[in-house]
Amino acid sequence: MTRPKKTTARAASKPKRAGGPRPAPKKKAAAAAPPPPRKPERAAAPPKRPASQPRTPAPRESLAAEPSVVAQIRELEAQLDRLIDQASRHELSGLAPDDEDEVEEAPAAVVAAPLPLDDDDGDDDDDDDHGHEPFAGTARPAEISSTEITAEYDVPDGGREHSRPGVPEPRASSAGIPPAPESVFDTARELLSSDFYLRKWGRLAMRGRSEEVDDFGYDPIYEAKLKPLLDFLYTTYFRVETTGVEHVPAQGRCVLVANHSGTLPLDGVMIKIAVKREHPAGRDVRWLTEDFITHFPYLGSAMNRLGAVRANQENAERLLDKDELVTVFPEGVKGIGKLFKDRYRLQRFGRGGFIKLCLRTSTPIVPVAVMGAEETSPLLFKIEHLSKALGVPYIPVTPTFPLLGPLGLLPAPTKWRIQFGEPLDLSGHGPEAADDEILVGKLGERVRASIQGMLDRAVGARKSVFFG
């Protein structure tokens, strides 16, 4: 009799595996995998360098310790300084040299490589944290105080340095210990920096300028450099004829009142050259110019360095206090903005500001008539819509501008005549007469009529605009 097999509850509740018989158990992966390769044995650490034995310098330290390379760079820098100073002295031979600009020749001294110092910070770095070579010897000088210095500099591995307390700043002591020499990298960094060239080439750029200018920016060296061009404009291009220049006083203050004309205000420059060349005393003339000319790029700076002064009462009084010759244009912007059909017709002289100025300062007036400037750039009409955006009173439209672009502003080679009239003496009136509006108006119309009469006679006698 067959005995039935006993089944437990656990065996009965366990479901059968589908998909055939149960596979054989896998062997452990660790047993099947090949054994890992053995690690190579670490090389034995090199023996520690004794404290007394100097270690081999790194590439940066070896370059820094070459005194010949540093001396050559210093010698090149000294030669560059000498060349710049020679060029500056050549241009400014008439001026006193500045002590700061004189460069002494740097001696190429050979500095011995210093011995390394052992530090106690636990690393093998024998140089200090300021990019300098350490001092020679085994101890630091007693005169150098140990202060905590935190500096930042580049290290050869490209990382950032860390600050270390207790590292003193190397400096020369009273015992005659020289300061630490700069490394080649410090010198190269200085030569490649922008500040180096700003210092060196900035002095070279200033060699053509005066070390001292007057209160209004007049530069005599700049005028001397432009003198050939100005003489060419006066004698060859405009062929200026000057009459009556003897009416200008040889000394003392005086106000030259002239008509204003021409799209480009060249009349002030021509009056200045006329008095400088034709007057027996060869006096200098300063002229008052409009605000937009003063602030105009390049043109305002050039006019200011030639002798132009911004037009206002304060500047004119300061010039007259120095007994200068001052040229004023009472028409102002209205004078240079006249259309070609209104040429040689004087505009209103304002409120007589120049008359009040001459009455307060007891200055004589000499009327001046300039003929020929009206035709240099005939103004057909002017555009005033974009004038505020460009910072000019108007945009001129001439036969050549803006058709030819900037070339259209070149003035035509017309024939110029400058006539100086009889002086008007105001010494009979006191300074209180400047408050008399009726007297100021009468004197202003008298000067205006004198200039208009000279213009009418000169234009009537002229046969040709270009040949006179």
Image (cartoon, helix red, strand yellow):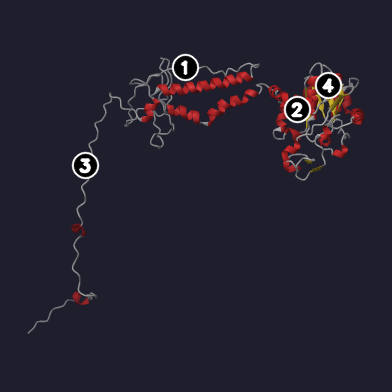
- Disc 1 secondary structure class: loop
Quadrant where the N terminus sits is bottom left
The residue at 34%/20% (across/down) is 137
Q: Nearer the viewer, residue 119 or 22?
A: 22
In percent of width and height, residue 146 lies at 40, 24
Tell me the kind of residue under disc 1. Pro
Circle 2 residue: 308
| Front residue of this view, candidates 17 and 203 | 203
Relative to residue 123, is residue 223 drawn left or right? right
Disc 3 to disc 1, how far (Cα)? 57 Å
Q: Which quadrant is the C terminus positioned in?
A: top right
Q: Residue beneath label 1, please?
A: 107
Q: Earlier in the sequence, mark 3 or mark 1?
A: 3
Q: CA distance from mark 2 to mark 4?
A: 16 Å
- Residue under label 4: 254
Tell me if I can see residue 215 in this picture. Answer: no
Q: From mark 2 to mark 1, how far is it between C-alphas?
A: 48 Å
Instruction: Please state the horizontal and vertical placement of residue 9, each as a whole percent of the image.
Output: 19, 76
Residue under circle 3? Answer: 41
Q: CA distance from mark 3 to mark 2?
A: 88 Å
Tell me: residue 341, above or below residue 78.
below
Q: Which residue is farthest top?
A: 175
* Residues at marks 3 and 4, CA–CA distance in whole angstroms: 102 Å
